[in-house]
Image (tube, grey):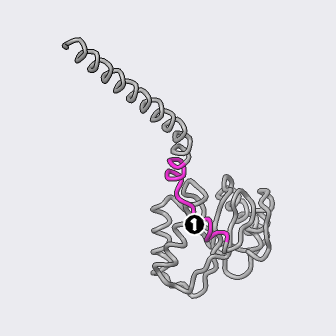
Amino acid sequence: MSKLLKQKIYEEFKQRYGAMEDCVLLKFEGLNVHTADQLRALLRKAGMRFNVVPNRLTSLLLKEMNFTVAEDLFVGPTAIVWGGGDAVAAPKILTDWLRTSRTKAVTIKGGFLGKKPMNAKQVKELANIPPRPVLLSMVLGAAIAPMTSLLYAVTAHQSGFVALLEALMEKKGKAGEQ
């Protein structure tokens, strides 16, 4: 490959990955076209992108973008998956797809989270984190819980006080009738 062509590819990748901070790297060997198209369609539907990348060029570009690059991630055929809005989306979709497709042609090599490298195990652990809306509702529930408990405590005492007043009024009413 000529130096000019490499420079053009490098510039294209630089533009393509410019805002990326999180991604998953895949190893694929023997992936047939039909299965690859299914994976691409699934990722596209989720707003993600899938590219087969040249290792050396991609490694250099990520270093320039201030990623902490672990060189063992860029050995053998490599594809990069990124996008989808949050860091959990790509690992979750890929691990689910790998589980259901049962293909041995694709494996997770690792990835990056906040420009820091992750190994395959860490990517799979990241996939187990609940989606962003669920996490936000959990945080909101935790923030509201003390206030809800206080509200129940206050209203319970008010209810008890009202019941006591009603009992006293009833008792005085009965005493006045006699």
Which residue, as the protein is rendered here, is positioned at the far front?
178
- Identified at 69% across, 54% down, the residue is 18
- Identified at 51% across, 67% down, the residue is 93
Foreground residue among 144 and 120: 144
Residue 35 lies, with reference to residue 129, above or below; the image says below
What residue does disc 1 label? 127
Q: Position of residue 51 (x, y in %)?
A: 60, 69
Is-magenta flag for residue 14? no
User: Which amino acid, by three-letter code, is at mark 1?
Assistant: Ala
- Identified at 73% across, 58% down, the residue is 115
Image-quadrant location for residue 10? bottom right
Image-quadrant location for residue 95? bottom right
Q: Position of residue 167 (x, y in %)?
A: 31, 24
Which residue, as the protein is rendered here, is positioned at the far left?
177
The magenta span reads 122-138
Residue 52 is left or right of residue 76, and the answer is left
